[in-house]
Image (cartoon, rainbow, N blue to C red):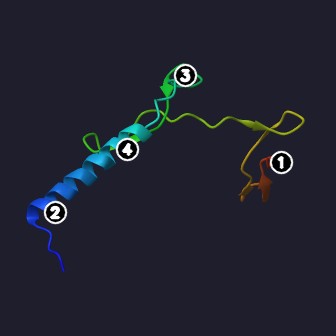
Amino acid sequence: MMRLSLSGLAAAAALYGASFAISSAIAQTPPAAAPTQQLTSDGKPCGPVAYSAAEQKYVGIPCNAPSQQTSDGKPCGAVAYSVAEQKYVGIPCPTK
């Protein structure tokens, strides 16, 4: 049984690491064009919201999801039960 010397093992590891780094760099795709900045209804920029440990709060303004409508133009979304009205309120969106 052959023994690999420490220097042989280090050389093999370096060769593997170099080939991995080169193949990873080649596999990277160029970045896509930057998406246009979304704005809220009052013109403020919105996007992903991150938690700031320094400020101990979420920072940023989330973007609202695009509003959905029924075929007759009425807004639709989640349907909830109203205890005060004793009925379900809201219009469910049609499934596609």
Relative to residue 44, is residue 71 drawn left or right? Answer: right
Gap in angstroms between the C-alphas marked 3 and 4? 29 Å
Q: Residue furthest right?
A: 72
Q: Nearer the viewer, residue 33 or 19?
A: 19
Query: Quadrant of the rendered structure where residue 69 is?
Result: top right
Q: Secondary structure at mark 4?
A: helix
Q: Nearer the viewer, mark 1 or mark 4?
A: 4
Instruction: Determine the residue positioned at 37% across, 44% down.
Output: 23
Q: Earlier in the sequence, mark 3 or mark 4?
A: 4
| Residue 64 x %, y % | 59, 35
Q: Earlier in the sequence, mark 1 or mark 3?
A: 3
Q: Earlier in the sequence, mark 2 or mark 1?
A: 2
| Residue 55 x %, y % | 28, 40
Q: Residues within 10 Å of mark 2 (few under 14, many from 20)?
A: few
Picture disc at residue 36: 3
Residue 51 seen from this side? no
Gap in angstroms between the C-alphas marked 1 and 3? 30 Å
Gap in angstroms between the C-alphas marked 2 and 3? 50 Å
Q: Nearer the viewer, mark 4 or mark 2?
A: 2
Q: Amino acid at mark 4?
A: Ser
Q: What residue is disc 2 on?
A: 9
Picture disc at residue 24: 4
Q: Secondary structure at mark 2?
A: helix
Q: Earlier in the sequence, mark 4 or mark 2?
A: 2
Q: Is residue 93 above or below residue 32?
A: below
Q: Residues within 10 Å of mark 1 (few under 14, many from 20)?
A: few
**Dot 1 and dot 3 residues touching (CB under 8 Å):** no
